[in-house]
Image (tube, rainbow, N blue to C red):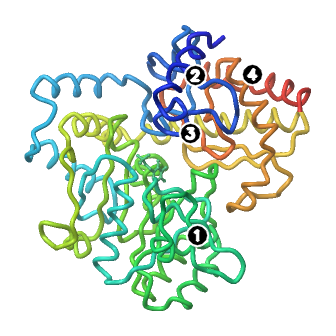
C-alpha cells in the first residue's frame, strides 16, 4: 500500500517545504504518508498506486457534485482554447456576478479574487476603509486563511490583545485582532464595550468548519447582527466553506441572517483557484476604482476559473434539488455512523449541517466551541482514520476538519462507508 506515494513524498520533501504546497495535506496530525492522487471521477479517487477511495474531502469543498463534473470540464476546455487569460474584462465575469446575486441574499456587488485567503484579507481592509476603524473581532478556532490579521491567538488572562500565532506576524498587526469565543455572545459584547468605537468588523465562519463542524447556536448569528447594528460594526460572514453548500444562499439563507460582507472560495471556483468578496452596495463602493480602498489582481476573474465556477453554480441554481438530495445522503450517513458508534460503546458527538459532518470522539455532551472541540480523542481518531483509509475511505486527515459530501455519492458508497466505519472502530478500539 502507498508504495509510489511514499517514493513521491520522499522526493517532494527534498524540494518542497514538508513535501506539500499546503500544510493540511502533510498528514501531520494523523502521521504516515500523504496519499498522492492521480485522478478522480464522481466520488471515487484513484491514487498513484491505483488504489481507489470513496472521497469525503472533495478538495475541501469545491467538488459538491463530484470530481471531473462534465459541464465544468467542458467549460474549461472550451474556454482554454480561446486563451487562458487577458487581464481585461470578459463577459463571463459579468454573468458570474449576476448569477451570484441571484443565488445569494444581500450580495449587491461582488469582486473576484484568487483564493479564500485573499477574499478575507480584502474584506477586512474594506471594512476598515469603510468604518475608519482598525480593530477586528474573530473567533477562536475559526479559520480565515493565512492573512497576517488572522494568525492571531487570544491573549492570555487579563490580556485581551492578541498574540501572533505564527512567527513573521508582527505585534503591530496582532494588537488589532481581538478574539472571542464561538457561540458566546457575551464574549463579543465584552470586547465591543471595551473597545467601543474602535472595532471595524466581526468576521466569523457562520457554521464553523475548521475546528470540525460546529453549528451556530440558536440566536448566535442574529445576536451578532444586532450587536453589529448597535455598534456600527461591519458583520462579515466567511462563507468560503459554507457558501453554496449549506444552502444555495449559504448560511445567510439557511439561518435567515444577512451579513454586510460575505467572502467566498472553494465551491465558487469549482476546483480552480477562486475567491470572492461581496455585499452591500454602500460598503462595496469603497473598493477601487469606485472608492479608494485599494484591491487588485492580475489573474482575478480569470476566464478558466470563471467558466468552471459558472458551470457549477448554474447547475446548483437550476437544480436546487441537489441540496435536498445531499442533505438526505448526509443524514443517512450520520445515522449509520451513530448506530456503529453506539453499538461499540464509543463516546461521541456528531455535528451535521447540510452536507457538512464531523464526529468528535469525546465524553462532552455537546461540541459548541474551540474548547469543547479540543476534547476529541486524537489518538483514537488517528487509528480510526488510518483504518478507514486502508478500507478505501478518504476522510479529512485531521480530527478538526469536516467531511464534505458530494451529490455523486451513491447508496452503495454510503453503505460501504458505514461498513468500513464499523470495522475501523473495532480496530481502533483494539489499538488505542
Ligand atoms: C479554506 C478557507 C479559507 C481560505 O481559503 P483558501 O482558498 O485556502 O485561501 C478561508 N476561510 C474559510 C472558512 C475556509 O474554510
Tell whether 66 sits left or right of 340.
left
For disc 1, does the CB lie below 8 Å from ligand 1? Answer: no
Tell me the residue that label 4 is attached to. 419
Q: Which of marks 3 and 4 is nearer the N terminus?
A: 3
Q: Are marks 2 and 1 in contact (CB under 8 Å)?
A: no
- Label 3's element? helix
- Of the numbered discs 1 and 4, the one sitting upstream in the chain is 1
Relative to residue 268, is residue 315 depicted above or below?
above
Q: Kindly report the distance in space between the C-alpha atoms of the residues bearing marks 4 and 2.
A: 22 Å
Q: Is mark 4 on a helix, strand or loop?
A: helix
Q: Which of marks 4 and 2 is in front?
A: 2
For the residues marked 3 and 2, what is the alpha-carbon distance in whole angstroms? 12 Å
Mark 1 and mark 4 residues within 8 Å of each other at the beta carbon: no
| CA neighbours of label 3 inside 10 A, class few (<14), some (14 to 19), many (20+) | some
Q: Which of marks 3 and 4 is in front?
A: 3
Q: Earlier in the sequence, mark 4 or mark 2?
A: 2
Q: In which quadrant is the C terminus drawn?
A: top right
Give whichever of 254, 132 is nearer the camera.
132
Given residues 355 and 18, the one toward you in this image is 18
Classify 10 Å Cα crowding around label 2: few (below 14), some (14-19), many (20 and above): many
Task: Tell me, for residue 163, which label it has, or none.
Answer: 1
Question: Which residue is rendered at x = 46% and y = 74% of the image?
Answer: 172
Disc 4 C-beta below 8 A from ligand 1: no
Task: Determine which residue is flagged by label 2.
Answer: 35
Residue wearing tag 3: 24
Residue ID at (80%, 26%): 422
Discs 3, 1 touching: Cβ within 8 Å = no
Between label 3 and label 1, give the one nearer the viewer.
1
Crowding near pointer 4: few (<14 within 10 Å), some, many (20+)?
some
Q: Nearer the viewer, mark 1 or mark 4?
A: 1
Q: Are marks 3 and 2 in contact (CB under 8 Å)?
A: no
Amino acid at each position: 500500500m502507498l508504495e509510489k506515494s511514499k517514493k513521491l513524498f520522499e522526493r517532494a520533501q527534498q524540494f518542497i517545504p514538508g513535501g506539500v504546497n499546503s500544510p493540511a495535506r502533510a498528514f501531520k496530525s494523523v502521521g504516515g504518508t500523504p496519499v498522492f492522487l492521480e485522478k478522480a471521477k464522481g466520488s471515487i479517487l484513484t491514487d498513484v498506486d491505483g488504489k481507489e477511495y470513496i472521497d469525503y474531502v472533495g478538495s475541501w469543498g469545491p467538488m459538491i457534485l463530484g470530481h471531473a463534473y462534465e459541464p465544468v470540464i467542458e467549460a474549461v476546455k472550451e474556454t482554454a482554447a480561446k486563451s487562458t487569460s487577458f487581464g481585461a474584462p470578459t463577459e463571463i465575469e459579468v454573468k458570474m456576478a449576476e448569477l451570484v446575486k441571484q443565488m445569494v441574499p444581500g450580495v449587491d456587488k461582488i469582486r473576484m479574487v484568487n483564493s479564500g485567503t485573499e477574499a478575507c484579507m480584502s474584506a477586512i481592509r474594506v471594512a476598515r476603509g469603510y468604518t475608519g476603524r482598525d480593530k477586528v473581532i474573530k473567533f477562536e478556532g475559526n479559520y480565515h486563511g493565512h492573512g497576517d490579521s488572522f494568525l492571531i491567538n487570544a491573549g492570555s488572562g487579563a490580556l485581551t490583545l492578541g498574540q501572533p500565532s505564527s512567527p513573521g506576524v508582527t505585534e503591530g498587526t496582532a494588537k488589532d485582532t481581538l478574539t472571542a469565543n464561538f457561540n458566546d455572545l457575551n464574549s463579543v459584547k465584552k470586547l465591543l464595550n471595551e473597545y467601543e468605537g474602535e472595532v471595524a468588523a466581526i468576521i466569523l465562519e457562520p457554521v464553523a468548519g475548521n475546528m470540525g463542524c460546529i453549528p451556530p447556536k440558536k440566536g448566535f448569528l442574529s445576536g451578532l447582527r444586532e450587536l453589529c447594528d448597535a455598534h456600527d460594526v461591519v458583520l462579515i460572514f466567511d462563507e468560503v466553506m459554507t457558501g453554496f453548500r449549506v444552502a444555495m444562499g449559504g448560511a445567510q439563507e439557511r439561518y435567515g441572517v444577512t451579513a454586510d460582507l460575505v467572502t467566498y472560495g472553494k465551491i465558487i471556483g469549482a476546483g480552480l483557484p477562486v475567491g470572492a468578496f461581496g455585499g452591500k452596495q454602500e460598503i462595496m463602493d469603497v473598493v477601487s476604482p469606485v472608492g479608494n480602498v485599494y484591491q487588485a489582481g492580475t489573474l482575478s476573474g480569470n476566464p478558466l476559473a470563471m467558466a468552471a465556477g459558472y458551470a457549477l453554480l448554474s447547475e446548483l441554481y437550476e437544480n436546487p434539488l441537489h441540496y435536498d438530495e445531499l442533505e438526505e445522503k448526509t443524514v443517512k450517513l450520520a445515522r449509520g455512523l451513530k448506530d456503529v458508534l453506539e453499538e461499540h460503546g464509543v463516546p461521541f458527538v456528531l455535528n451535521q449541517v447540510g452536507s457538512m459532518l464531523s464526529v468528535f470522539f469525546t465524553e462532552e455532551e455537546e461540541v459548541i466551541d474551540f474548547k469543547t472541540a479540543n476534547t476529541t480523542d486524537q489518538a483514537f481518531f488517528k487509528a480510526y482514520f488510518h483504518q478507514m483509509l486502508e478500507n478505501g475511505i478518504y476522510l479529512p486527515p485531521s480530527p478538526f476538519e469536516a467531511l464534505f459530501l458530494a451529490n455523486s455519492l451513491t447508496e452503495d458508497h454510503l453503505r460501504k462507508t458505514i461498513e468500513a466505519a464499523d470495522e475501523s472502530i473495532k480496530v481502533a478500539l483494539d489499538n488505542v
